[in-house]
Image: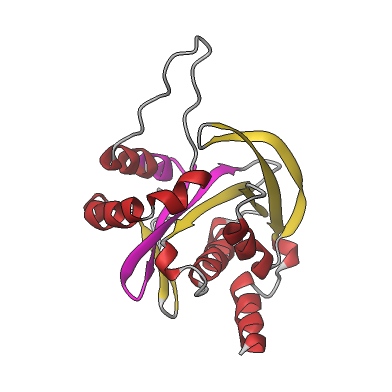
Amino acid sequence: MNASWPVELAEGDVALRPIRARDQRAWREVNQRNREWLRPWEATVPPTAAGHATGVRPTYRQMVRHLRAEAAAGRILPFVVTYRGRLVGQLTVAGITWGSMCSAHIGYWVDQAVAGRGVMPTAVALVVDHCFGAVGLHRVEVCIRPENIPSRRVVEKLGFREEGLRPRYLHIDGGWRDHLVFAMTAEEVPEGLLNRWRQANSRLK
């Protein structure tokens, strides 16, 4: 396991920490309570080429075992998001690629009950700074369905660049869905993304 994992990150009431098997009860409560809020944006398994039924969704424990194994291999960073000590979502840095690219992509979801309070922009800013700093990546991107206005607000608030459309990019909610690509490189936030977010918040107050 590399020096940048496991790690805990925090800013005010918002914190990120590695996902754990013992988070199951809290994770399931939040995820199930938000089923209708999350369903239009969650990845699904497409039918096989032979037209058979879609794959079975993994159990929570299977998901955690997979995420932690991938983290140990240095391919992902799987976090839960907490707000005032309570689990309210999940954020994963995935597709970590080295060589001439040094890039990754970020996916996230949050409890509708805390949406709009700056929880996810703060969490994304924390993890982007970690990726550009301790991890040593050069670029991060977030791919979002055009219709997902709450998720788009997160990256827009943080100043991610919109790079364009990826047609039929991911299988979401039962079909192949277009996604907008938002990206940021380390050179664009020399002062740190969290610092930029703090300054933006102070101007709004």
Taking 137 as reference, is 197 above or below it?
below
Residue 61: x and y in percent read: 26, 41
In the image, residue 194 above or below residue 92: below
Count of all numbered marks drawn on residues in the image: 0
Q: What is the residue that sits farthest to the right in this orientation? A: 164
Report the residue at 66% width, 81% height from top. 200
Residue extending farthest to the bottom is 205
Q: From which residue to which does the magenta span run?
A: 69-97
Residue at (71, 58) in percent of width and height: 185
Q: How is the image coloured?
A: secondary structure
Residue that appears at 29% across and 42% down: 60
Residue drawn at point x = 64 percent, y = 58 percent: 152
Residue 4 is at least partly visible in this image: no
- Asked if the magenta segment contains residue 72, the reply would be yes
Quarter holding the C terminus is bottom right
Q: Residue pushed farthest front?
A: 36
**Could you tell whether 124 is left or right of 73 in the image?**
right
Image location (x, y in percent) of residue 171: 55, 33
Tell me if I can see residue 150 in this picture: yes
- Whether 137 is drawn above or below 101: the answer is below
Query: What percent of the width, then of the height, locates residue 48?
Result: 49, 16
Is most of the magenta stretch helix, strand or loop?
A: strand
Residue 124 vs 65, above or below: the answer is: below
Residue 183 vs residue 119: left or right?
Answer: right
Q: Position of residue 165 (x, y in %)?
A: 75, 43
Farthest residue to the top: give it: 50
Location of residue 149 (image quadrant): bottom right
Of residues 81 and 2, the one drawn nearer to the viewer in this rendering: 81
Give 193 or 157, whichever is nearer the viewer.
Answer: 157
